[in-house]
Image (cartoon, rainbow, N blue to C red):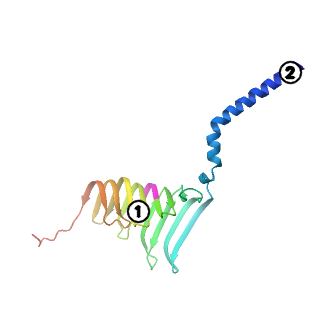
């Protein structure tokens, strides 16, 4: 009986030692899980949001899933399954849109980061396609360090890297390729 008690204590001590040694290597994971800054505040599915000014709808946003991280520094909204945003004029006509397979919105900075199959269309119907786009709403600017292509009625330009106004005007492609069509007045010599 004494021998069985000693064996049981030895087995229990070994088990505790193994458990404690494995916990030490997982403490980083435990701390990360316990950190409220990394935890979502709210998770919402199938979201449609309207933004208005004086009862006039300006934006409509749809997403299959919205995750809010209000305790993060800086706080942000994550759209892991994509987002689609439309901008309207006063007659409820779509003047611009953007969609992507993944996005984040940093609320304090009013900055969007869209990734994966990003497609943006401006009021002229010009279409921008890229894999990554940053939209700074405060400055009214868009940026990308990835390959971009802008196509339109009289426009087909592509390259790596972009800086432009949010309506695609004043576009600066860092490493351009493609064609730009310009009307030439034949009377001018």
Q: Is residue 123 shown in magenta? A: no
Q: Which mark is residue 4?
A: 2
Using residue 130 as the reference point, say whether residue 109 is left or right of it.
right
Asked if residue 114 is among those painted magenta in the image, a careful observer would answer yes
Query: Residue 1 or 175: which is nearer the viewer?
Result: 1
For the residue labelled by badge 1, is the local secondary structure a helix, a strand or a loop? strand
Q: Is residue 141 above or below residue 35?
A: below
Is 9 or 189 nearer to us in this picture?
Answer: 9
Q: Check the picture and name the quadrant holding the C terminus.
A: bottom left
Rate crowding at label 1 as few (under 14), some (14 to 19) or many (20 or more) other CA atoms within 10 Å: many
Work out whether 170 lies above or below 11. Answer: below
Residue under the image location 77 percent in, 27 percent down: 13
Per the image, the residue denoted by label 1 is 120
User: Which secondary structure dominates the residues rendered in magenta?
Assistant: strand
Sequence-earlier tag: 1 or 2: 2
Report crowding for label 2: few under 14, some 14 to 19, many 20 or more residues within 10 A (C-alpha).
few
Give percent across and percent down for residue 90.
Answer: 45, 79
């Amino acid at each position: 009986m004494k021998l069985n008690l000693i064996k049981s204590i030895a087995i229990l001590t070994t088990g505790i030692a193994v458990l404690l040694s494995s916990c030490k290597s997982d403490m980083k994971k435990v701390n990360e899980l316990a950190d409220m800054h990394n935890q979502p505040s709210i998770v919402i599915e199938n979201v449609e949001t309207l933004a208005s000014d004086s009862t006039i709808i300006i934006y409509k946003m749809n997403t299959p899933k919205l995750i809010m991280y209000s305790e993060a520094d800086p706080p942000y909204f994550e759209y892991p399954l994509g987002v689609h945003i439309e901008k309207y004029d006063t007659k409820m006509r779509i003047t611009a849109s953007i969609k992507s397979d993944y996005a984040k919105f940093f609320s304090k900075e009013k900055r969007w980061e869209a990734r994966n199959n990003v497609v943006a269309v401006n009021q002229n119907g010009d279409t921008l396609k890229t894999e990554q786009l940053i939209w700074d709403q405060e400055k009214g600017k868009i940026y990308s360090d990835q390959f971009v292509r802008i196509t339109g009625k009289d426009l087909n330009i592509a390259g790596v890297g972009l800086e432009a106004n949010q309506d695609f005007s004043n576009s600066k492609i860092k490493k351009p390729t493609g064609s730009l069509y310009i009307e030439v007045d034949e009377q001018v010599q």
